[in-house]
Amino acid sequence: MPSLHVPKMSCGGCLNTVTRAIAALDPQARVRGDLEKRIVHVETKEPEAALLEALRAAGYPASPIEPALG
């Protein structure tokens, strides 16, 4: 499940836009957002690169968060 940092996501409207951008790519995707940390967790079969491009195109550039080891 990719986790992405979305620095420009600061409100519920932003999260809705991010969720719609991901749903346009994969209607079956499940998105959980953390507005405080500006992170989204996405359950999808789409590659991470496609998610990043969809968010960039929607005006919300994101970067992947590497899973913590340990």
Image: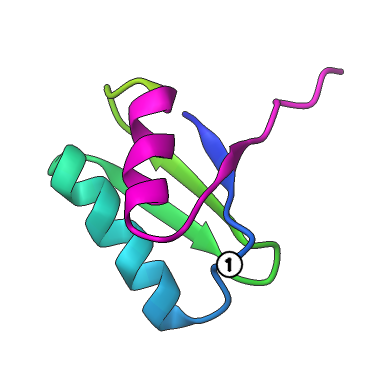
Residue plotted at (37% across, 37% down): 53
| Image height of 20 relative to 68, above or below | below
Residue on which the image places disc 1: 8
| Image height of 6 relative to 17, above or below | above
Magenta stretch holds residue 64: yes
x%, y% of residue 46?
28, 24
Residue 63 placement: quadrant: top right
In the image: residue 33, left or right of residue 5 = left
Q: Which residues are magenta?
A: 48-70
x%, y% of residue 68?
79, 26
Residue plotted at (47% across, 29% down): 1
Residue 10 placement: quadrant: bottom right
SS type, badge 1:
loop
Quadrant where the C terminus sits is top right
The residue nearer to you, when weighing 34 against 38, is: 38
Residue plotted at (20% across, 49% down): 23
Residue plotted at (35% across, 20% down): 47
